[in-house]
Image (tube, helix red, strand yellow):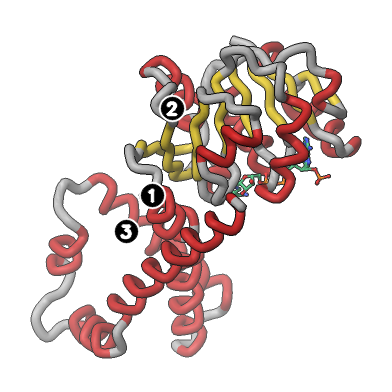
């Protein structure tokens, strides 16, 4: 399978690294990246073929990955029209919907939209995916294989749910960083050094997430199990619940989803 990346920035680097670790061949990957130093970095790190412009491509091959910023997409897609043939296209650009991508690619229809998140940069991402109806099961499997190289994948049938994916897993790392930040501030107030507070906060979040991932029980049941009557956890949770922590998180996610819808409309114009 011949693969072309348009854009060789942070996400492309993470994806290429992950794909190579998962059995894709470096010789099958070409990256179009206008930045000379970015091209040098890519070539040195991954031994892939790097080109400065899409006009140097004879064809995009079997799989095209669009990894430019949303506002760069129009310019990036223009030279690809007429070179796509039956290629499967995956866009990882936030907010650009399938109809807009198809329009920018001259009516091409074998398109998948993916929304990864920043932990993908270390292979621990969560990517939401959705496809135009013209993408068959084999096309979905290829996309799954490519994105699974940087973490977990989840397909949604209704593209509207990509705004929910954006609000939950796309912006989600920031919510977790906020929790870590709050735990670190509490640790400082309790007399711990920043290093000690960082270790206590981060290892707790990582451990609890790993435990929740392995458990078949809902998070609420896990929470109740560590909350003994009259104990320390109960004292903390009562104060947090009274402060509206849970409602605040839910309202925040809903605000992110609404903003994603608004931004998607603006990008589609
Ligand atoms: N980073 C994340 O965690 C994350 C998460 C979810 C989704 N995404 C999405 O992933 C996409 C890429 O993000 P990123 O963080 O990897 O951005 P990035 O580091 O800026 O990478 C984009 C690269 O594309 C290059 N480029 C610009 N115009 C081009 C063109 N016409 N043809 C080929 N290459 C071109 C850019 O070069 P210049 O720098 O010279 O412009 C840059 O090197 C974005 O659409 C973003 O929404 C990113």
Relative to 124, is 252 above or below? below
Residue 88 vs residue 39: left or right? Answer: left
Of the residues under marks 2 and 3, which one precedes in the sequence?
Answer: 2
Relative to 28, is 165 above or below? below
Front residue (pair 128, 75): 75
Front residue (pair 191, 107): 107
State the image coordinates of residue 95 (x, y, percent, origin top left).
55, 51
Which of the numbered marks, if any, corresponds to residue 160? 1
Task: State which quadrant residue 206 falls in.
Answer: bottom left
Q: Which residue is mark 2?
A: 144
Q: Can residue 198 be seen here?
A: yes
Whether the residues at callouts 1 and 2 have beta carbons within 8 Å, the answer is no
Of badges 2 and 3, the one in the foreground is 2
Q: Residue at x 36, y 49 (%)?
A: 161
The count of marks equals: 3
Secondary structure, mark 2, is: helix
Query: Marks 1 and 2, Cα distance to the nearest angstrom?
Result: 20 Å
- Whether ligand 1 has any atom under 8 Å from the Cβ at mark 3 is answered as no
């Amino acid at each position: 399978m011949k693969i072309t990346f348009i854009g060789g920035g942070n996400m492309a680097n993470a994806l290429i690294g992950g794909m190579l670790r998962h059995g894709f061949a470096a010789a099958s990957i070409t990256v179009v990246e206008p930045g000379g130093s970015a091209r040098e970095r890519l070539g040195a790190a991954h031994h892939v073929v790097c080109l400065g412009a899409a006009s140097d491509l004879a064809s995009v091959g079997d799989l095209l990955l669009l990894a430019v910023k949303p506002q760069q997409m129009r310019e990036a897609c223009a030279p690809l029209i007429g070179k796509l043939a039956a290629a499967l296209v995956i866009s990882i650009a936030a907010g650009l919907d399938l109809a807009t991508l198809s329009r920018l690619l001259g009516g091409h229809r074998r398109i998948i939209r993916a929304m990864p998140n920043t932990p993908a940069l270390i292979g621990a991402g969560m990517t939401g995916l959705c496809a135009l109806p013209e993408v068959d099961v084999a096309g979905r499997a290829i996309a799954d294989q490519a994105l699974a190289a940087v973490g977990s994948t989840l397909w949604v049938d209704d593209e509207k749910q990509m705004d929910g994916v954006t609000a939950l897993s796309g912006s989600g790392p920031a919510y977790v960083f906020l929790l870590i930040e709050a735990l670190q501030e509490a640790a400082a107030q309790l007399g711990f050094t920043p290093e000690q507070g960082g270790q206590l906060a981060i290892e707790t979040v990582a451990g609890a997430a790993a435990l929740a991932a392995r458990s078949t029980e809902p998070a609420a049941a896990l929470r109740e199990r560590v909350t003994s009557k009259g104990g320390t956890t109960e004292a903390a949770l009562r104060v947090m619940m009274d402060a509206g922590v849970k409602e605040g998180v839910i309202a925040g996610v809903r605000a992110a989803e609404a903003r994603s819808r608004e931004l998607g409309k603006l990008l589609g114009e």
